[in-house]
Image (cartoon, helix red, strand yellow):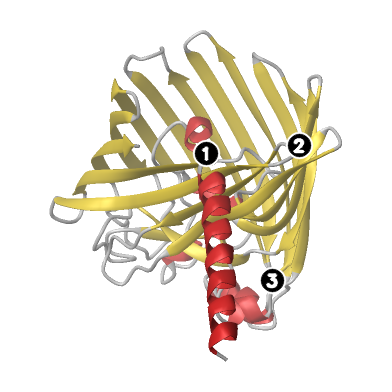
Amino acid sequence: MKRVSVVVFFVALLLSLSMICALAQAISNVELHGYMQNRFYIPQSAQPRFAVERVSLSAAAKLPSESNAYVEVYLPVQPGSALYLESGYVDLPVGKGRLRIGKGRQLNFGITPTYPNRKTSQYGILSETFTRARIQGLQYAYKTGILDGGVSVFTDLTGGTRQIGNFAGALTGVDTQPYVCESEPSGAAQTNSRMAASAKFGCSTPTFNLHASYATGGLSQVNANTIASYWGLPGNASMNHNKYGVDGTWGSGPWVAQVEAYQGKFGSVKLSGYSILGGYQPKDKIRVYARYAAIVSDKQPIAAQPTGWDPQPLTIGVVKPLFKGVWIECDYENNLQRVPKGGTKIDDGLFFVELFTGF
């Protein structure tokens, strides 16, 4: 019995050593990164305050056959917030493109709102509503010459809300205007999730990009009814969740312009929106951007439900690079909201200074 125990011990030791060697070899192909956003807020309707907006940690690994894996998490920085898996996927080379399996940004509808694409720290209402939320599924993207595009199959998103003028401690409907947007399924919405598909095709050149996109899916009945209630509509709402749109980007020297226009069905409500951005971005110098966006519903808004009002924010962003991976950004957002008869304008204007630190 003792001899057997000794043999088992040495076998376990050898296996452990081999696993450590393999792990060490794998770790050598892993890069760890992170960033944090520290902000000083000056809201229109509340007292100024400091806040940590976000802390992100990520790991990228190179795998055999030109494959790679990526994981990113957001750490909880506000009371009541939780650890959030932002991305977790593997990318594989397939044909002339790449296949992404797992959770990550939507690659095949509209402009993917990474920081280099959206230009400012603020996402803007159009990307919040139509393109920001992460999806889980399969995504194939390719590029051949100037033509590019792809298709995605995924668990459909659900209809949630975000707030214009949001900051740490803000009161919804008092300091901010809520509006309908896509969000990741959770709770009952996760149980009732439906499958969805999207496709994007177009062309990309060093000077301009132009694409058309389409997506189709479905909401749960509970979710569709909740969205309908923001416009005072009865229950048993349609569960449609289809959307389409076009986007274009032009750049010449330090100048950049970007246009997006999307329309989608969120149950019984049709939302149409557009965004126009212009910017001056000389390398390693102060960059300036201006974005105007609007979202309009096909239903009559009611005074008691600010979520159904039509938001029209104007955003001005100024970015000053300090050194590699670190910059200061000043953003001002003024919502030129359409207030229905009987409603009171929400003081949701917001100015903040952000120190972005990447490492």
* Mark number, residue 114: 1
Q: Label 3: few (<14), some or many (≥20) within 10 Å?
A: many
Compared with 59, 155 (above or below) is below
Toward which corner of the image does residue 269 lie, by quadrant? bottom right
Residue 164 in the image: state x and y as whole percent.
38, 53
Instruction: Give the side of residue 325 with respect to residue 295, left or right.
Output: left
* Mark number, residue 326: none
As drawn, which residue projects farthest toward the front? 3
Type of amino acid under label 3: Leu
Residue at 53% of width from left, 79% of height from top?
6
Q: Mark 3 points at which residue?
A: 219
Type of amino acid under label 1: Thr
Toward which corner of the image does residue 264 lie, by quadrant? bottom right
Instruction: Give the side of residue 220 with respect to residue 337, left or right.
Output: right
Determine the secondary structure under disc 1: loop
Instruction: Give the side of residue 23 with respect to residue 198, left or right.
Output: left
The CA span between labels 2 and 1 is: 18 Å
Q: Can residue 248 be seen here?
A: yes
Residue 46 in the image: state x and y as whole percent.
17, 56
Compared with 101, 307 (above or below) is below
| Viewer-closest of 233 and 71 | 71
| Viewer-closest of 327 and 62 | 62
Q: Mark 2 points at which residue?
A: 212
Residue at 41% of width from left, 13% of height from top?
283
The CA span between labels 3 and 2 is: 23 Å
| Viewer-closest of 140 and 16 | 16
Type of amino acid under label 2: Ala
Q: Label 2: few (<14), some or many (≥20) within 10 Å?
A: many
Mark 3 touches mark 1? (CB < 8 Å) = no
Q: Can residue 200 be seen here?
A: no
Mark 2 touches mark 1? (CB < 8 Å) = no
Q: Which of marks 3 and 1 is nearer the N terminus?
A: 1
